[in-house]
Amino acid sequence: MSARCHDLFAMNDLDDDRRTKRSDDPITALHYQLAHARSHAQLDAMVLVDGSGALVAGAGAWPVCEELAAYAPLLAHRSAGESAFLCSHLDRLRETVSLRSMMFDGFEVVLAARGPVGASTEASLVRAAAGCRRILGAEA
């Protein structure tokens, strides 16, 4: 075996990190995290949004991410003053949307996934939430 091949095998033995894509930019890193979780659970989209519905990072078709971002805070915190139309729309969304609220630096963010609701989606949300915490350096 050539020295070059031996070096490549040695590098692979030392590389225990499962992540194949990396970025020092937090927004790009969040996108990679969400894209991996989305792909793993075969979801339509996964987004991280702030409490006002502003999209922080997302993975999936852009229109789906935008809609999911806009409605995620409403889905997480239903209000008594919502119109009948909005309530009906939120009820339909709840059939295909899974949520996880988290606190970062004293602010609530919502991790939302659209696709099949079930154990695989919940597991992907848990892994994505842990990745988001790691990337953002937040306390759990």
Image (cartoon, grey):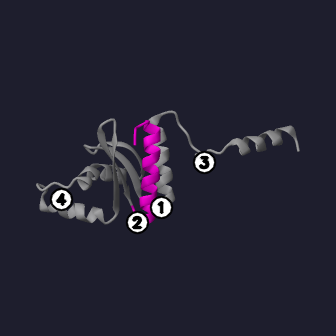
Looking at the rendered image, the disc whose residue lies closer to the viewer, 4 or 2, is 2
Image location (x, y in percent) of residue 114: 37, 59
**If the image is split into quadrants, where does the N terminus sit?**
top right
Name the element at disc 3.
Answer: loop
What crowding class fits label 3: few (fewer than 14 Cα within 10 Å), some (14-19), or many (20 or more)? few
Image location (x, y in percent) of residue 125: 42, 54
Residue located 50% across and 56% down the image: 39
Name the element at disc 2.
Answer: loop
Name the amino acid, label 3.
Arg
Q: CA distance from mark 3 to mark 4?
A: 42 Å
Of residues 63 and 72, the one drawn nearer to the viewer in this rendering: 72
Name the element at disc 1.
Answer: loop
Q: CA distance from mark 1 to mark 2?
A: 8 Å
Q: CA distance from mark 1 to mark 3?
A: 19 Å
Contact between labelled residues 3 and 1, with CB atoms less than 8 Å apart: no
Residue located 18% across and 61% down the image: 87
Contact between labelled residues 4 and 3, with CB atoms less than 8 Å apart: no
Q: Which residue is mark 2?
A: 116
Q: Which residue is mark 4?
A: 86
Q: Quadrant of residue 56?
A: top left
Q: CA distance from mark 1 to mark 4?
A: 27 Å
Name the amino acid, label 4.
Leu
Q: Which residue is mark 3?
A: 18
